[in-house]
Structures are given as C-alpha cells and as structure tokens.
Amino acid sequence: MSSVEVKKFMDLCDTLKQLETKKIRLEEQFKNKKEMLTELVREIKAEGYDPNTLKDVIAEKEAELQNEVEAFEKALQTASTELAKAEG
C-alpha cells in the first residue's frame, strides 16, 4: 500500500468511528423519545382520553371554550349597554 492509500484508509476508519458514535447517540435519543411518548400516552389514557381521538376531543373542548367566551362577551356587552343607559 502506498502512503496515500494508507492515509485514505485511516481517514475512512476515522469517519466510520465517527458515524458509529453518531449512530449510537441517535439510537439513544430515539429510545428516550420513544419512552417519553409511551409515558405521555399512558398519562393521556390515565386522564380518560383515547390518544387516537385526542384531536376530536381538543376540537370539542375548543368549541365549548369559544361558546363560553362568546356568551361572556354577550353578557358583558349587555351589562355595558345597561350601565350606559343608567348613567345617561
């Protein structure tokens, strides 16, 4: 082997080691994220929700909240109108 080939081989070995280290880190991160997701699903189920229908539940709760806000704004407007009548 020539010195150029040896250098190239050594560079490739270093690159391989770096990639193996990166692969291990990524596998650990994946494992941690998977565990976190599993725990989150467990918590969601413990609260009585089905993770598969959570989007629907969120939409339903947002609609309920929006209705409550609109009712409050209407009552506030009515009170404001009555207050203006009483003052004027």
Image (cartoon, rainbow, N blue to C red):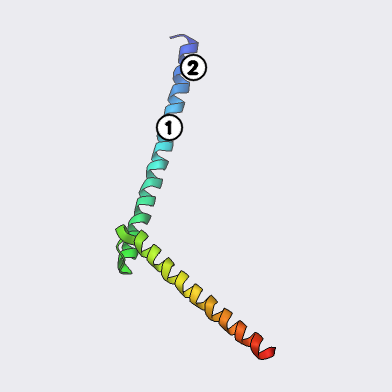
Q: Quadrant of the N terminus?
A: top left
Q: Nearer the viewer, residue 61 or 46?
A: 61
Name the mark on residue 19: 1
Q: Nearer the viewer, residue 51 or 9?
A: 51
Circle 2: residue type: Lys
User: Dividing the image into 4 quarters, which one contains the C terminus?
Assistant: bottom right
The mark total stands at 2
Q: Going by the picture, which residue comes out furthest to the bottom? A: 86
Q: Earlier in the sequence, mark 1 or mark 2?
A: 2
Q: CA distance from mark 1 to mark 2?
A: 18 Å
- Residue displayed at 58% across by 79% down: 77
In this rendered view, identify the residue nearer to me: 68 or 33.
Answer: 68
Name above or below for residue 63 compared with residue 4: below
Residue 53 location (% of width, % of height): 31, 60
Q: Residues within 10 Å of mark 2 (few under 14, many from 20)?
A: few
Expressed as whole percent of the image width and height from the top left, the position of residue 87 reads 69, 89
Q: Left or right: where does residue 7 sit relative to residue 41?
A: right
Q: Residue at x 40, y 37 (%)?
A: 23
Could you tell whether 47 is left or right of 10 in the image? Answer: left
Q: Residue at x 46, y 15 (%)?
A: 6
**In the rendering, which numbered label is found on residue 32?**
none
User: Is 85 placed above or below 28 here?
Assistant: below
Q: Please name the amino acid that badge 1 sits on.
A: Leu
Residue 63: name its quadrant.
bottom left
The residue positioned 33% from the left and 69% from the top of the image is 47
**Residue 7's mark?**
2
> Which mark is nearer the camera, 1 or 2?
1
Q: Position of residue 30 (x, y in %)?
A: 38, 46
Q: Secondary structure at mark 1?
A: helix
Question: Do residues under tags 1 and 2 come within 8 Å of each other at their CB atoms?
Answer: no
